[in-house]
Amino acid sequence: MTEILLFAIPALLIILGALIVVFAKNPVHNAMGLVLTLTSLAIVYITLNATFVAMVQMLVYAGAVMTLFLFVIMMIGVDKPDQSKESIKGQSLLISGTLIILVAIVLFVILENGLNWDLFFPESENIIDGTPSLIAGVMFTSWVLPFEIISILLIVATTAALALAYEFKKSDSND
């Protein structure tokens, strides 16, 4: 019974995501439906004991490729006037508060460890056997802080690129 549930729930999410991809009118919603489909597919891979394939599915397809898709969607002009206004009251305040909490958590972790620079540059043992479990074990224990810092930098770069593209497009329309 457990095996059926472990397959049926992700399978239903795959179908739901595919339906969102096909029937959603907003391209960003289509992309999010594809993220749901790819993530659910990774869960199916995990149930099949294909952890490396699931990890690659999440990092490459649900992560990098979908970020590229969203870049393209934003660059081709999805930002219509009705979509650029603030749809949630206090949205800017919520985002600012989330950023402050994130910075506070990072500072807390750094200060709790006494400004130990080993958090940023951990020494890892030589991995002779490159199995996914060993790679993941080192990456998500010893190297977790540098990994997260890189992800934050990529998010900032994405946001900056979108802001620059929006400002460039806005100045072109005013000319």
Image (cartoon, rainbow, N blue to C red):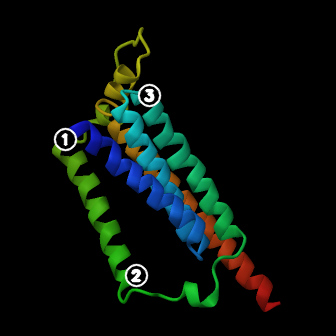
| Label 2 with label 1: CB-CB less than 8 Å | no
Quarter of the image holding residue 113? top left
The Cα atoms of the two marked residues, 2 and 3, are separated by 38 Å
Of 120 and 70, nearer the camera is 70
**Residue of label 2:** 92
Identify the element where label 3 is drawn: helix
Q: Which circle marks residue 9 in the picture?
A: none
**Residue of label 1:** 114
Assign the N terminus to one quadrant of the image: top left
Q: Is residue 164 left or right of residue 6?
A: right
Q: Residue at x 68, y 71 (%)?
A: 165
Which of the two marks, 2 or 3, is nearer to us in this view?
3
Measured as percent of width and height from the top left, residue 50 is found at 41, 27
Of 155 and 64, nearer the camera is 64
**Mark 3 vs mark 1: which is more N-terminal?**
3
Of 107 and 132, nearer the camera is 132
The Cα atoms of the two marked residues, 3 and 1, are separated by 35 Å
- Residue projecting furthest to the top: 128
Which of the two marks, 2 or 1, is nearer to us in this view?
2
Measured as percent of width and height from the top left, residue 120 is found at 35, 36
The Cα atoms of the two marked residues, 2 and 1, are separated by 33 Å
Label 1 crowd (10 A; few <14 / some 14-19 / many >=20): few
Q: Is residue 2 left or right of residue 102?
A: left
**Residue of label 3:** 52
Q: Is residue 103 above or below residue 136?
A: below
Label 3 crowd (10 A; few <14 / some 14-19 / many >=20): some
